[in-house]
Image (tube, rainbow, N blue to C red):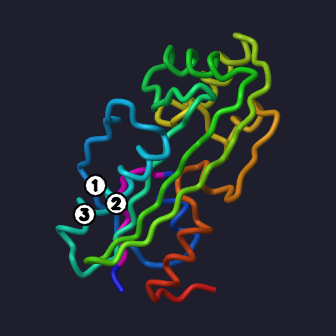
Amino acid sequence: MPLILASTSRYRRELLERLRLPFHVARPETDETALPGEAAAALAQRLARAKAAAVAVRQPESWVIGSDQAAELEDGRILGKPGTRDAAIAQLRGMSGRAVHFRTAVCLLRGDRRLEALDTTTVRFRALSGEEIERYVDAEQPLDCAGSFKSEGLGIALFDAIEPRDPTALVGLPLIALAGMLRQAGFALP
């Protein structure tokens, strides 16, 4: 069965490759702006659905995977991708010594059949000095990552703890949930 990842994220592509299923990648062309007052979980779920739907309309015979992630501070503020060194440093300063919740949604869509999941991963940051933050940002350049770190790389050194249900969700695609959804859709997985 044709499978399409509605994302140009190399992180999501690399994660999906672990399942050893053939797939194509398509750009979803989705506006990722949060709605006024939208909670992180609702934002991630809405965008995962929208990305899958945007590609499914062009490829109606394919199963399409949409996924999105929103990082949320304890006070409910949503953190996006920093884009610049200064913004990454500011995000990490704001997360120092605090817990951040990463809401990662995935949607598998074909026609009127839709399977969805939402994962929450809590990352507890240790108290970080300004020098540590700057060294980290300069070393890893996490400018395209919500929360300004790469847990699969050097970013792991910034944490006191990670409380995951699915360790791949923090990178951007919850493979445990997705594998179950793909099996429900008829894909052959172990």
Report the Cα–Cα distance between label 3 and label 2.
Answer: 6 Å
Please state which amino acid type lies under the numbered disc 2.
Ala
Extreme-left residue of the structure: 58
> Do the numbered discs 3 and 2 sit on residues whose CB atoms are within 8 Å?
yes
State which tag comes first along the sequence, 1 or 2.
2
Residue beneath disc 3: 55
Residue at image location 43% in from the left, 56% down from the top: 67
Whole-percent x, y for residue 140 in the image: 61, 31
* Picture layout, residue 28 above or below residue 64: above
Query: Which structural element holds mark 3?
Result: helix
Image point 25% across, 77% down: which residue?
A: 111
- Whichever of labels 3 and 2 marks the residue nearer the N terminus, that label is 2
Residue range highlighted in magenta = 3-10
Can you say whether 127 is above or below 34 in the image? above
What amino acid type is highlighted by mark number 1?
Arg
In the rendered image, residue 41, in percent from the top left (x then y), is placed at 49, 46
| Residue 167 placement (x, y as % from top left) | 68, 55
* In the image, farthest residue toward the right: 160
Nearer to us of marks 3 and 1 is 3
Are dots 3 and 1 in contact, CB under 8 Å?
no
Locate the C terminus and report the quarter of the image it occupies: bottom right
Q: Residue at x 49, y 18 (%)?
A: 87
Circles 1 and 2: CB distance less than 8 Å?
Answer: yes
Q: Which residue is mark 2?
A: 6
Report the side of 125 relative to 118 (left or right).
right
Left or right position of 38 against 94:
left
142 on left or right of 83: right
Q: Which residue is mark 1?
A: 27
